[in-house]
């Protein structure tokens, strides 16, 4: 008997030891889904006896059974272990029963069937109410549509009767209104033309300003290019001048170095010339010396021949 009481107590306590969903710990539990971790006031994942409600009768006893290590705290692991043990006992009792179900489960199953029937009846009632509401709504909409169509037909009929009179009045009003409308139209066209003219003038002024701006920009650019070219020319001329001055300075320096030598050469020139003339005379004299000697040697002979000549001429005459 005691054993049966304990098993019944465990079955009734099973919903209290189910662990809350970790993905949504703050979610509101469904109807009938109470867990022992619902009493975790500080949300630290552990339930103590202090956190249990004061008016609970069997929860302290159940707490002691779940608290395996007797440290005054129920953890998730301990709750899972206790749940597994209870489930094991229930399965054993079901297996032992002839009809495959334990006596302790019959009441729960009957309640479950009753709840299912109640839910089904409730769903059917809700469905019937919904169908009724939809039907009523459709009938109401149909009636409203028919009423609107009837009202529209009556209005069209009334307008058809009223149309000839309205047409005559409208034609008369239009005829009276025509001159004013024409004048208004002319004024509107005139205003439009003036507006277009003003717009064209503004666009022309804008284009002129743009052209002047472009011209000024081009002029400034040309001026800048000219200034640049002049600057480049001046720099080039300056560079050439500097180069010429440098070349002139180098030439002057070279001439300065060369001048003493030229001066010495110029100073020596008369002396060298005199020496050259003297040497030439000496050479001529030397060249003439053998000839003079030969002439000197021939002079007595020539004299002798000259002396012999009259005698030879006399002999010749005699011979003749």
Image: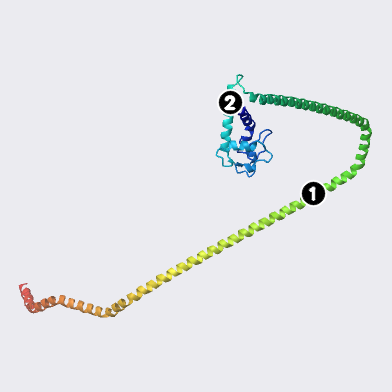
Q: Is residue 249 visible?
A: yes
The mark that comes first in sequence, 1 or 2, is 2
- Viewer-nearest of discs 1 and 2: 2
Which SS class for mark 1? helix
Residue found 74% across the figure and 53% down from its top = 201
Q: Position of residue 203 (x, y in %)?
A: 72, 52
SS at circle 2: helix
Residue 319 lies left or right of residue 219; in this view the side is left
Question: In this rendering, would 3 be left or right of 232?
Answer: right
Q: In the image, is residue 320 above or below residue 116?
A: below
Give the x, y percent position of residue 15: 64, 33
- Hey, which quadrant is residue 32 in on the image? top right
Residue 145: which quarter of the image?
top right
The residues bearing labels 1 and 2 have C-alpha atoms spaced at a distance of 100 Å
Q: Quadrant of residue 314?
A: bottom left
Q: Quadrant of the C terminus?
A: bottom left
Residue to which mark 2 is pinned: 91
Q: Which residue is mark 1?
A: 193
User: Outermost residue toward the front?
Assistant: 1
Image side of residue 169 versus residue 272, left or right:
right
Circle number at residue 310: none
149 or 314: nearer the eye?
149
Q: Provide residue 212's location: percent of width, then percent of height.
A: 66, 58
- Crowding at label 1, few (<14), some or many (≥20) Cα neighbours within 10 Å? few
Q: Position of residue 290 (x, y in %)?
A: 12, 76
| Relative height, residue 305 to residue 229 (above, below) | below
């Amino acid at each position: 008997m005691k054993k049966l009481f304990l098993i019944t107590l465990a079955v009734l306590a099973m919903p209290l030891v189910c662990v809350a969903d970790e993905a949504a710990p703050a979610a509101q539990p469904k109807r009938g889904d109470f867990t022992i971790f619902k009493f975790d006031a500080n949300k630290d994942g552990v339930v103590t006896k202090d956190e249990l409600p004061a008016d609970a009768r069997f929860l302290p006893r159940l707490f002691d059974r779940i608290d395996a290590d007797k440290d005054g705290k129920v953890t998730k692991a301990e709750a899972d272990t206790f749940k597994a043990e209870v489930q094991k006992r229930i399965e054993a009792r079901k297996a032992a029963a002839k009809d495959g179900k334990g006596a302790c489960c019959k009441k729960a199953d009957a309640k479950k069937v009753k709840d299912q029937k109640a839910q089904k009846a409730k769903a059917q009632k809700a469905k019937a109410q919904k169908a009724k509401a939809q039907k009523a709504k459709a009938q109401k909409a149909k009636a409203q549509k028919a009423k609107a169509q009837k009202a529209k037909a009556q209005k069209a009929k009334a307008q058809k009767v009223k149309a000839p009179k309205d047409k005559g009045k409208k034609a008369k009003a239009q005829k009276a209104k025509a001159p004013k409308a024409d004048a208004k139209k002319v004024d509107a066209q005139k205003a439009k033309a003036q507006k277009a003219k003003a717009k064209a003038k503004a666009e022309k002024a804008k284009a002129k300003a743009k052209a002047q701006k472009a011209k000024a920009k081009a002029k400034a650019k040309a001026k800048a290019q000219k200034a640049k070219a002049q600057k480049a020319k001046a720099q080039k001329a300056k560079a050439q001048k500097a180069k010429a001055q440098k070349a002139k300075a180098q030439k002057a320096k070279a001439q300065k170095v060369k001048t003493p030598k030229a001066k010495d050469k110029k100073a020596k020139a008369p002396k060298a010339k005199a020496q050259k003339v003297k040497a030439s005379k000496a050479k001529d004299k030397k060249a003439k010396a053998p000839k003079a000697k030969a002439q000197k040697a021939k002079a007595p002979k020539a004299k002798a021949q000259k002396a012999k000549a009259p005698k030879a001429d006399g002999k010749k005459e005699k011979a003749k």
